[in-house]
Amino acid sequence: MKLAVPKEIWPGEKRVAVTPDTVKKLIGLGFDVAIEAGAGINAAIPDDRFADAGATIAKTMKTTVKDADVILKVRPPVVDGKTDELAAYRKGAAVIALLDPYDRKDLIEKMAAAGVSSFAMELMPRISRAQSMDVLSSQSNLAGYRAVLDAAHEFGRIYPMMMTAAGTLPPARIVVVGAGVAGLQAIATAKRLGAVVSAFDVRPAVKEQVQSLGGTFIEVEDDAADGETAGGYAKEMSDEYKAKQAAKLKEVLAKTDIVITTALIPGRPAPEIVTADMVAGMKPGSVIIDLAAERGGNVAGAKLGETVVTANGVKIIGPENITSSVATDATAMYAKNLLNFITLSVDKEKGTLAFNAEDQIIVETMLTRDGKVVHPKFGGEEVANG
């Protein structure tokens, strides 16, 4: 069995799909591992470390993926007017990556036409057996951490209260919108740095988690408020709830120095939670980091990859691929997620690879197979079967 890891060519992407440690384990599963030269450089992993782990270093993408049974990537295959990565893949190969299926339905059709079996890691079901494969959690954890540091860099003051002979400096006040994995890590990081932290989420169930990290939970009084889906994600709320939420947040944000927003609803544009009116009421010098900018943003006026300074002196930052700014650790976590996923489908005794179409993990992540789109959410008529 051959497993290939091409170099990422997505603009700004510094992560790679394997580490020397996971290469050793993949070889132990029976794979011959080929890695494109320079694939790990931006994650601080030179070629010789992969070679020492037992991988073959290939000069080009085409030689890397030639005859590969499995292709591990971070970003989707690039298919545009100049580049067609899919054309180099063997028909029947399994492509495993963050495939951005909700926004790249055209690519799903192209992968089906190319005859590859594709698996979108961001569709991993939230079940206990799949926790070690949950790439959204592993990468969001780092995004929440990094957002707090980026905010500190942009903020014109320090985070902790500091008592000196020259006077006392008050602590920074931070509000985190969305207490999922990224939000909880942001809360924990901000508290460690000495800030006073509050958090808002439509899911009342996360209140205890926020409080356990030392944060104050911002509550919106609404008897019908329960914004959690069966899968544990946030869901769209009623207009009445949104009105109450807006009033409460406007009041809180007027006293806030830093806002970090993380609210996302799978398969939908990010909900706008921080309105222009709220931003206008914030203090000059305040900083907003919108981690949902890649899906439209939680903040009015946020622009992906840009820093917008409002008329009242508030910085709104829409980071693009923030996890690549901590590429070494992001790679380590992502590579382990992929290793755990592929291990599920390897028969070590026979040295064969077979994706069990009755396994919930396989069913919910598989997009294409045998020349067809098989995922019902993206145009498949039925779930793939044996």
Image (cartoon, helix red, strand yellow):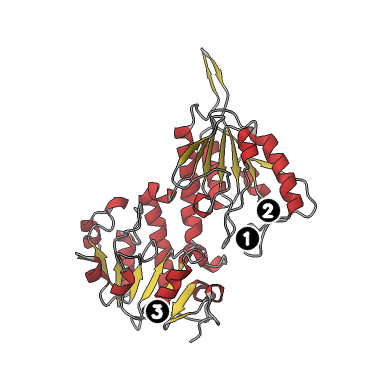
Q: Residue 26: horizontal and vertical position, in percent?
A: 33, 69
Label whose residue precedes the other's in the sequence (3 or 2): 3
User: In this view of the protein, can residue 55 be seen by the observer?
Assistant: no
Q: Position of residue 18 (x, y in %)?
A: 33, 61
**Could you say where residue 314 lies in the image, as x and y percent from the top left?**
54, 33
Residue 64's x, y, as percent? 25, 69
Residue at 70% in and 55% down: 237
State whether residue 194 is above or below residue 32. Answer: above
Mark 2 highlights which residue?
203
Q: According to the image, label 3 marks what residue?
A: 113
What element does badge 2 sit on? loop
Q: Which residue is mark 1?
A: 232
Label 3 residue SS:
helix
Task: Select label 1 or label 3 by which is in front.
Answer: 3
Q: Can see residue 233?
A: yes
- Callout 1 touching callout 2 (CB < 8 Å): no
Q: Residue at horizontal 65%, vertical 58%?
A: 235
| Numbered disc 1: secondary structure | loop
**Local crowd size for mark 3, using a 10 Å CA cut-off: few (<14), some (14–19), many (≥20):** some
Depth check, front residue: 146 or 307: 307
Task: Give the residue type that dot 3 points to.
Answer: Ala
Instruction: Name the quadrant of the N terminus.
Output: bottom left
Q: Do tag 1 and tag 3 residues touch (Cβ < 8 Å)?
A: no
| Numbered tag placed on residue 29 in the rendering | none
